[in-house]
Amino acid sequence: MIVPSMTFQEIHEELIKDALDVLIKVFSFRKQFDKTVLKSTRYPVIKSYDFITRERKNKCNVTFRAQKRSQRRNPIIGIYAVFDRPEGKYAVSPKMDFTDITIYPPHFFKRYRERILKDDSITNSKLIKLYFKDDWGFKGAIVDKNFEAVCRSCEDFSPDEKISFVAALTQGYCFGENQGTVCILKTIISEEMLFKKQKKVFKSLQETFHETNTERYGKILYPYLSMSG
């Protein structure tokens, strides 16, 4: 089980140990999702399932997406686990082969609530689930002085807070740090927070993000306003 005292690298090791249990559950829910897609008349179909792994007791979620009926047996799959520390609730999302993980600290979700969702009424657990239901990964670049200036103008980070990359997301842009096999998303900003000149700087990130996902998944249907699970 992920515990508060673990380092991010230890959390990655914990998820690797739990990988078989996680994938067994994913396979089981995938069969249920297949039936859901067959019954659906509207697309995309998105369904999310919560579960706790059998032996290591990690709290996880898997989300399936089918852009069309024929994709039901080869859906887009996203997995994340949640864990608590004194400062709040974290999420961690592994790649399907568990070689890398992405950490989402409480501050990231705080900014997501304030800047993107703009809803104070829902719980942190529900907010995290909503984020991942509309998550198509991220496409980034190494931070230069222009990107870093934008980040620090939006956040009261200490001078020694490391920001190594900037990336485009479905709902905006994020800044974070790479630590070997661990990627940490530290904050998120919306398009509307950028000045006109800044939008030009960020535009290429968003274009590359959409091009990459179109090549990988085909035409993506936005937005996800009616999601089950």
Image (cartoon, helix red, strand yellow):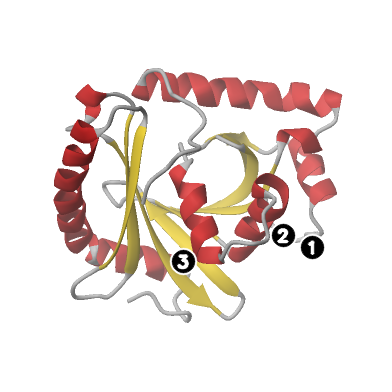
Query: At numbered mark 1, what does the secondary structure look like: helix, strand or loop?
Result: loop
Residue under label 2? 161
Q: Position of residue 30 (x, y in %)?
A: 19, 45
Residue 215's image quarter?
top left
Distance between the alpha carbons at the discs numbered 1 and 2: 5 Å
Q: Position of residue 180 (x, y in %)?
A: 46, 53
Looking at the image, which is closer to me, 21 or 224? 224
| Residue at 55% across, 22% down | 208
| Amino acid type of the residue that numbered disc 1 sits on in the rendered structure | Ser
Image quadrant where one finds the N terminus: bottom left
* Residue 146 is at least partly visible in this image: no
| Placement of 181 over or under 219, stated as above or below | below
Distance between the alpha carbons at the discs numbered 3 and 1: 21 Å
> Which mark sits nearer the N-terminus, 3 or 1?
3
| Amino acid type of the residue that numbered disc 3 sits on in the rendered structure | Phe
Looking at the image, which is closer to me, 224 or 51? 224
| Crowd around label 1: few <14 · some 14–19 · many ≥20 (10 Å) | few
Distance between the alpha carbons at the discs numbered 2 and 3: 17 Å
Residue under label 3? 8
| Crowd around label 3: few <14 · some 14–19 · many ≥20 (10 Å) | some
* CB-based contact (under 8 Å), mark 3 and mark 1: no
Residue under label 1? 158
Looking at the image, which is closer to me, 202 or 13? 202
Query: At numbered mark 3, what does the secondary structure look like: helix, strand or loop?
Result: helix
* CB-based contact (under 8 Å), mark 1 and mark 2: yes
| Amino acid type of the residue that numbered disc 2 sits on in the rendered structure | Glu
